[in-house]
Structures are given as structure tokens and as C-alpha cells.
Image (spheres, rainbow, N blue to C red):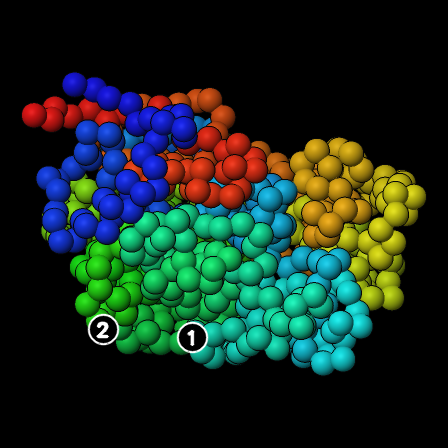
Amino acid sequence: MSRNLPMSRKLLSCVATGALALGLAAAHPAPAGADEHGHVKHVLLISIDGMHALDFANCAKGVASVFFGDPYCPNLAELSDNGVIFTETSTSRPSDSFPGLTALVTGGSPRSTGAFYDVSYDRALSPPKVTTPYGIVGGAALCPSVVGTQVGNDEEIDIDYTKLDAGGGINPDYLPRDPKNGCAPVYPHQFIRVNTLFEVVKESGGYTAWSDKHQSYELTNGRSGKGVDDFYAPEINSIPVALPGVPGCSPLPDQTAVSSSNAWTDSFANIKCYDTLKVQAILNEIAGLSHDGTAARRVPNVFGMNFQAVSVGQKLVEKSINVTGGYLDAAGTPSTALVGEIQFVDAAIGKMVSELKHRGLYQDTAIIITAKHGQSPIDPNRVLRIPADNANDEPPSMVLSPTGNVGTGYPVLQALEDDISLLWLADNSEAATLNAVAQLQANAAKIGADGGEFFYGRNLDLMFSDPRTPEGSRTPNIIVAPNVGVVYTGGKKKVAEHGGFAHDDTTVIMLVSHPEISHAVIHSPVETAQVAPTILALLGLDPDSLIAVQKEGTQVLPGIQFSRNHD
């Protein structure tokens, strides 16, 4: 018979039932496959950062000019045979990795999570104890005397971001401090205002793991700080080094990008070595080991990783080898470099599936493949790098702060500018915001936004919280979504970027696969935030256990049907 995975959160199994199922699974294995309610024992979540829905459609069906029209992601295509494809999936807005991952694991937008970008501003926190490597001004005496600070949740909070292991973790002296809590440092998991699916699974007796690119993504631990049992985050912006444990990566294959000024994202070849570290972690976890393979562990009930290779393939210009990534046209025909990155990721996912089958876990595991963010623009003819491509153009922050400086003492306290501009103003009043918007609109052509959009006031409040309220202490005063194709950068090392609101930024791959799921293609709009409640539903847990799901009414992904006869 056929059955639907329950879509009404009120009808799902309660947390106590899920706790019993997860807690007893190891001692009393149930028959393989989804149970009569459409619940599984494991969920593997993969974020292929940057991968559009269009990329998936092209690689699964083939493009005439690539491999004579043959598909070039056969493993993803095979997973979709027993899976639901969502063609109109939107990421978080802004479409940055930090809010993108937060949406995936909490079910919420910046409205409830407070996560706008990896580097942002908080009007309620105090500066760090020590000035960060990227210049967030700190000082022991600045808390509690100063309230309001730039916040770094990127590699700048590592003990040593030049090292693959980040020097051993996070340096608390680089973290913002809470003036209402004895000036205690605020870790990323404390910065997030809601709980995560990892906490819910763990509280229900489950075992959890996650692998990502920065130490700051320990945000997955959630407010308790204990959500992830096995967390692994080799620093992606560290100096590339030989990886003896990775075949073909000692020495690294691209020796043109291994200097002290390089990061793993500077090379089409070396990024594959970097991502393979996390692939090996997943394979070890499937085998019932810790991520490094040194200790016996339970197979996680929820686990996963992000891939960075496709994102690099979409935007890198590697001058040292005269290769440019990205696309050849607006239809998303991939460059040779991008094809190679997609093939690498596809093969890696194929290895995970093979290991699940080898360990007898494939029938027990649902696989969800999506992306934290997309990349814009797809059309190479739309690229305009400001000011790199035209010295007369300027990013919005320079219109408001002509010296280019931001921070205390300047009109702009913080500016995040990739292919969008998020602006936090020193004067938080409505009048100051209106005056700044008028300046920006008067210079719309110069900032590449004469065909873009300006979000401020109530238009911004409808998406997020009013920046003049306690809930809106992290909300920018102004968001400028420029013309499609504009990237705010002074260099020419990339032909695309993410962070914005454009279609290419936000429309990403979404595939939910399981051997017993009936194949379907759903064209109704969904969001990556729906992944978190869906994972809990698949595990037989209550999506309403997630605070963001309660606050925002986030729904389980629709149309997931299991079909199998159970005697």
C-alpha cells in the first residue's frame, strides 16, 4: 500500500515516541526500511554550497555541449529515481553560508535566529576582549562600557585561522561579549537565538555529527552547546597544506596555490582535496566510527557535511593556470572547471551511498541534498564587479562613508557587501535611515542599483524585525539588492558571488531520497528552512520541538510519499 509521510506537525509522533525509537535502535534493531509511519533511523544531510536547481537539472539530464549530452552527475540522478525533486527551493535571505546553514538546522529565518551574515552587527552586545585579526576593535575595558559591536562568526575567531585545525578551535577573546551576563564571551551557538535539530535528536536519545568549513559552525550545537556529538570543521581559509591521508593530495595537486597568501578556495584542484577530508569523515561515521576513524561510535541518527567545490567552480578565476570557472551562457551551460567540480561531488556522494549499502544502512537512511546558498549571476554577460571593473563606481558603503571606513565614529557601523549590501548605521533613527536611502538612490547608477531594490523601514520590518526594537538589535537599517550580476569587490578573482536576494542567489537544489520514496517532482515554492522540520518528521520526532518552527510556522516539505508493502 502507499502512505503519505504525515504533513501536519500536530499529527506527527511525539518527542517521547521518537526518543524511545532512537534510544533503543542500537539494542533492538527494527526491520530494515522505513516503518509503517514513514519514519527512518538515519538522515544524511548534504549541502552542495552554490548548487542551483538548474545545475542539478542540467547535470542529471545532460547538456548538448557537455559529454555529447550525457548526464554528468549519475549518482545524484540515481538518487532522484527514488526521491522528491523540488524545483523552486529558496534559501535564506540573505543567501550567505552562515544564515543558510542556520536555516537548514533550525527551520528559521534571521527574524527568529538573529543570523544575518557571518560578519554582522549587534546593538546589544559589547566588543571582544581583543581586537580580531580582521580588525573588529576589542579591549578588556570595552565591556560593559560599550554596547554595540561588530560581530565576527567567520574564520577570524579561530585561534589561528592560517592552520587547517584552526589552531585548536575558537579563541574566546575574539568573541563579542554579553554586558548583561558578566561580559561573558558569546559563542556562535549562543549567538543563535533558537535551538537546532541536533539538540532535539540528541535529547531524544539520538547520536549526531556535522562537518563544515569554519569553527564558527559549531552553531549547530544550538543554545545548549551540546547538540552535536561529533563536530569537525577544517578551516577552509587556512593556508593549503599537503594531506597525507587523502589520495593524490600529498603534495597538493596545484602547487601554484599553496603560498602563505592562499586559501583552499584559490584552486579548482586543491578544493577537492579539502572537501575529501569531510567526505572521509562521513564514510567513517557510516562505518560506526568517529569522524577521524580513531574510535568506535554509533552511526549518527542525523549527520552530514557541506561541499565547497561547486561554489569554487562557479566563481573562481584562477589566473595562475589561466582557468575561469562559472557558466558559458544564461542557460547554465557549465564551464569545464565547473563540470569537474560537479563530477567530483557526485562521485563523493556515490561513495557515501555505496558505504551505506555496504553497512546495511541504505534502507534505514533518508538522504537530503540541498545548498546553503546559490551563486549570482549565472549569465556571464551580467557580471559587473564594483569597483574592479569600473573605477568610477562605488559600493553603497562608500557613498555613505566616503573614506571607505566603517565602524565606531563613522556613519556606517558595519557593511557587508558581496552581491548585496547590508548596512548598519551609527544613527539608528528613522530620519537618518531615510536620509541615507536618499543618498544611495541619488547614486543608484554609481552603486549598480539603478535596476535594483532598496529595503528599509516597514518594507524591511516585514522580512525581519524593526532595528529599533530589542528583537531587531541585529537587523540592518538598509539592504541594497543591486542589479543582477553586480558583485561588490575590488578584485577580479571571481565571476560570481552569493549573499543576495536574486533568483540565482536563492534558487537551489533540493532532493529528498530514500529507497521507498515514490519519485515526484514538485514545482510549488518551498524553502531550505523546511529541511529541519522535515528531518525531525522523518525520524519520528516532533517538528514543533524547534523554536523557530513554532515562531515562524515553518512547514514540513510536502509530497514525500513512502510506498512499500508491510505485512
Write the residue at 34% across / 58% down. Answer: 209
Assign a secondary structure to mark 2: loop
In this view, which residue lies farthest toward the left?
A: 567
Rendered-image quadrant of the C terminus = top left
Q: Is residue 469 left or right of residue 346?
A: right
Task: Give the total of numbered labels.
Answer: 2
Give the residue type at disc 1.
Asp
Write the residue at 52% across / 37% down. Answer: 550
Q: Position of residue 343 (x, y in %)?
A: 32, 48
Q: Is residue 161 left or right of residue 398?
A: left
Q: Position of residue 223 (x, y in %)?
A: 51, 57
Residue 365 to residue 65: above or below = below
> Which residue position is annotated with label 2?
294
**Residue 218, which numbered label?**
none
Q: Is residue 228 left or right of residue 217?
A: left
Q: Is residue 268 left or right of residue 244?
A: right
Of residue 122 and residue 432, the one placed in the foreground of this image is 122
Write the residue at 18% across / 49% down. Answer: 25
Q: Quadrant of residue 81?
A: top left
Q: Position of residue 560 (x, y in %)?
A: 32, 27
In this view, which residue lies farthest toward the top?
A: 1
Does the image show residue 147? yes
> Which residue position is annotated with label 1?
165
Assign a secondary structure to mark 1: loop
